[in-house]
Amino acid sequence: MSKKTTRREALIYHAKPQPGKIAIVPTKPYATQRDLALAYSPGVAEPCLEISKNKDEVYRYTSKGNLVAIISNGTAVLGLGNIGPEASKPVMEGKGLLFKIFADIDGMDIEVDTEDVDKFIETVKMIAPTFGGINLEDIKAPEAFEIERRLKAELDIPVMHDDQHGTAIISAAALLNALEITNKKIEDVRIVVSGAGAAAVSCTRLYKAFGAKDENIVMLDSKGVIRKDRESLSKEKLEFASDRKIDTLDEAMKDADVFIGLSIADIVTTKMLLSMAKDPIVFAMANPDPEINYDLAVKTRKDIIMATGRSDHPNQVNNVLGFPFIFRGALDVRATGINEEMKMAAVKALAQLTRQPVPEQVNIAYGETRLTFGKDYIIPKPFDPRLIAEIPPAVAKAAMESGIAKQPIEDWDRYREELLQRSGDDNKVVRLLHNRAKMNLKKIVFAEADHLDVLKAAQIVHEEGIAIPILLGNKEIIEELKEELEFDANIEIIDPNTPDSEKKKIQYATKYWENRRRSGSTLYNAKSKMRERNYFGAMMVLEGDADGMISGYSRAFPRVVKPVFEVIGRATNVSRAATVHIMITKRGPLFLADTSININPSAEELAEIAQNTANVATAFGFNPVMALLSYANYGSSTHPHAKKVKEAVRILHEKNPDLIVDGEIQTDFALNKELLQSQFPFSKLAGKNVNTLIFPNLESANITYKLLKELNKANSIGPIMLGLRRSVHIMQLGASVDEMVNMTAVAAIDAQEREKRKRARSGK
């Protein structure tokens, strides 16, 4: 992605459709006068009086217990330096977004306009009653040390400077696992730390808490090795000053077991790497460019275990693995702080989680056959859904055992269930799709590329590396639009109505006629059809000139689906093609079918649609829990419409007894786990979270998904075509740019899956 495009897209993202990344929304009803009277005057006086009698009641009657302040003065923002409080606000809002999507914590950013330590501390103390926790962010050292130390001592809520402790916690977990793999003990290994800022100091202190010895640690700053005989050392640097008579990184690296990089790019040479001990552990965490290039390092030392701060290499040390879940656990027991025991518990939980079998959803997201504990997997992936159920309980238990929890947890099973419900897997599914598509790039035809929004989608797909777009349409218009969008990449453009495409048109027309000459087609008609982009594009996919196609932006669904069915056709052993929409909801993704094709399917067809939908959910890494919907519950109606659904369920139970599916059932019972358990405990769905809904007819499915989309502003991915011979997907008329990007990822993944099945059949 070019810097020009990155800047443009980033500014647009932050500015529109409304400025910023976070907002405040009501959590209580407010529709009636009675609601407003309870929310404000006179009803609000009652909780005020209760809190005045007992300050702890503020956690019962307000949002304090789930509200974290993200506070900065803008003195050390990312790699940008001291850019000021206003300029730091986008970063703080971003941190609030991460708190919400990973741990369902409400983060409120606060930018303080002072570099005076006393004033900063006083400001935070004065606003602390509002919050359940304080996350300090992007404050330069050494002031950051004093600010955190004093606030932790003077406040009775969790306080953590994530720049210090986040990297320390994640890297410590990775280090414990790397030492396990290399069969080395932390008390014996020689550690070199490049960097002496807040993160480096915190990392080294935490390693010492796990057993690292002072005499085995060498820390360097911009002047070289920090030695005890150096003058004017700060208190923090003096803590890690070495007795060794060495001055340079080159000298320090000789026979070292571990290198911890929190400094600048490219300061470690291959010579230094070769001088390290057997099975070296190298955490080069400078961002965006590490202390030594990853590919160069693994090429130089085959026995290396390496981690970086980058997502495009194995073993990413990413703070998002820590801070949301640490604060979640601390808030949930109303801890009065975040102590060493809690941080160490988070480290141990992360390390142990890495050693457990990885869920298929994570394997799919990262395009892995199977992630397993080893040199290239020493720390969990950020999208691992187990993080929220493992890290907060470990932190909460440590808070309780260390005596700083005001509200201990008694039912741990219930707590873990609540944590999983908070997670929701909402927009994570989109990130999973994009990541997986990137693992094996496929050529995807954009059949309407001479429309501005379609071309915008193709541009994002190209720049994000989701797929290789092929632009189909009027070449002159496409070139003009590309110039308008500053889309200067060399992308293949095909115009079916130009002489350049004549040879392909004849080839495709002949093949089309051969396939359909017994269905009334003539060669003349076939040639005429190849002037239409949906016929031409579908033939590209059929003939292997592309891996997939998306279309439908500018034409009604029936007009687009006709050429697709004629050219591509149904897959072997599929009697009915169908479509699935994935609705991204707060409770997680919901798979809805059939939303676009079958008007009134029979029981047999409904069962086939359900089975194919289950296959889609599984392919995307979700275990399908499926409800076949009706207006009736379990035999309460004998009308043919209800009996059809009941029969479809019987067929599914008979053909696939392991599939978690039941019905006929009403939508509210299917989605309300408690209601279903109380009324129909015999159901296969009892006690489970339904994530797949099969509708009895097209009307109900199409109306429902569009209601969800418009009324709840739920994002959707679809319609995903089921049962075709190739990866072709048809969008709804007027689909948004984001919807087209997501559908491209789906088309790419569909093509990947088909390729895998083909290889499996051929034994390769």
Image (cartoon, rainbow, N blue to C red):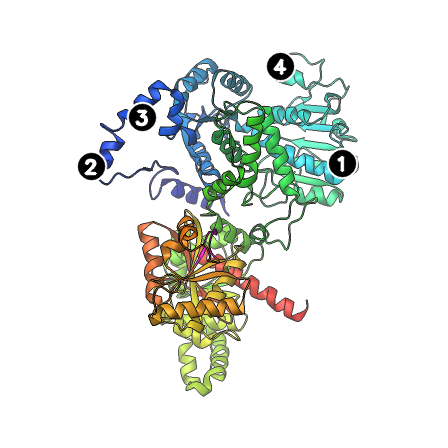
- Above or below for 623 versus 699: above
Q: What residue is shown with label 3?
A: 47
Q: What residue is shown with label 2?
A: 33
Whether tag 1 and tag 2 are in contact, CB under 8 A, the answer is no
Residue positioned 35% across, 53% down in the render: 709
Q: Secondary structure at mark 2?
A: helix
Which residue is nearer to you in this view: 464 or 101? 101
User: Taking the image as drawn, is residue 54 in sight?
Assistant: yes
Q: Is residue 578 magenta?
A: no
* N-terminal label among 3 and 2: 2
Cα distance between the residues tagged 3 and 4: 47 Å
Q: Which residues are magenta?
A: 685-692
Which residue is nearer to you in this view: 388 or 569? 388
Q: Can you tell which quarter of the image residue 641 is in?
A: bottom left
Q: Nearer the viewer, mark 3 or mark 4?
A: 3
Cα distance between the residues tagged 1 and 3: 67 Å
What residue type is disc 1 on? Lys
* N-terminal label among 2 and 4: 2
User: Taking the image as drawn, is residue 469 in sight?
Assistant: no
Q: What residue is shown with label 4?
A: 235
Name the spot of residue 73 as percent of width and height, x first.
45, 23
Q: What residue is shown with label 1?
A: 271
Residue positioned 61% across, 48% down in the render: 358
